[in-house]
Image: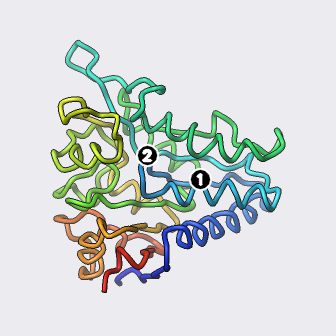
Amino acid sequence: MPAPVTVFDTPEQLGGALAGEILDRTRAALRRRRRFLLGCPSGRTPRVIYQALARRAAEANDNLSHLVIVMMDEYLNSDGKGGFVTCPMNAHYSCLGFAFREIQAPVNQELPADACIPDHHIWIPDPADPGEYDARLADAGGVDLFIMASGASDGHVAFNPPGSPPAGGASIVALSEETRQDNLSTFPQFKSLAEVPTHGVSVGLGTIARLSREAVLVMHGAGKRESARRVQAASGFDAAWPATLVHECRRGRTYLDKAAAGP
């Protein structure tokens, strides 16, 4: 069944609405004395959500000490021996660094110490054993809500390019040229395509579909109009456009702003 679509006037309204939903669910989890796992992409698209999350949590004096930030992926560098290691956390393109700088830090800045997101509640897949990430998520009871974003040029989700298997788990992925080109805009400190990493470790499409209780695909801005059109035109998963995975997720839904929705 196709995922329902909600269109907001602006990215800020979209971010505020989804942040409100996340906080409603974290409060319910806190009442039940359980962790809340939030699947998070890095990059431009989700910033409005994370900014609204920090603002609204501060306004409500929320307790987010039970919130677990489940990052989708990380960039890899060569280890010089034919293998890979995660990029340094202080690298401008590091997804782990993004989690600390742009999700945890703004939230924790406004909350009492005992209500803050702890460092050990920021998770990321390990290139030495990617499959362990799926096992870890399954052992934790799954991801309560997965935020998904879509590549503008090819519909990639996390680092999964077109043609990725819908049941695939976490793995090391060779980044497509389209994904790497997108990253020149996402990370303007890259001076050329040659500086963009060629590999990453990423959750699989199956990680998201199989291990999430609900998923929200977020797209805003005119640059995401084609992706929004492709997703809305599909009635189920289309391997040629990975973002259509939202149709196969439990409680999958799509949030757009007017610019992405188009005329």
How far, Cα to Cα, is label 1 from label 2?
Answer: 13 Å
Going 31% across and 81% down the picture, which residue do you hit? Answer: 262
The answer to whether 214 is drawn above or below residue 55 in the figure is below
- The residue wearing badge 2 is 134
**Which x, y percent locates residue 204?**
33, 51
Name the amino acid type tagged 1.
Leu
Identify the residue at the far top of this view: 81
Of helix, strand and loop, which one carries label 1? strand
Instruction: Estimate the x, y position of residue 84 in percent, counting from the top left.
Output: 29, 23
Label 2 SS = helix
| Residue at the image position 58 percent from the left and 48 percent from the top | 140
Q: From what the image shows, is residue 242 above or below residue 160? A: below
Q: Which mark is residue 37?
A: 1
Instruction: Give the amino acid at mark 2.
Output: Asp
- Render colour scheme: rainbow
Q: Is residue 105 left or right of residue 94?
A: right
Which dot, 1 or 2, sits closer to the camera? Answer: 1
Looking at the rendered structure, the number of numbered marks drawn on it comes to: 2
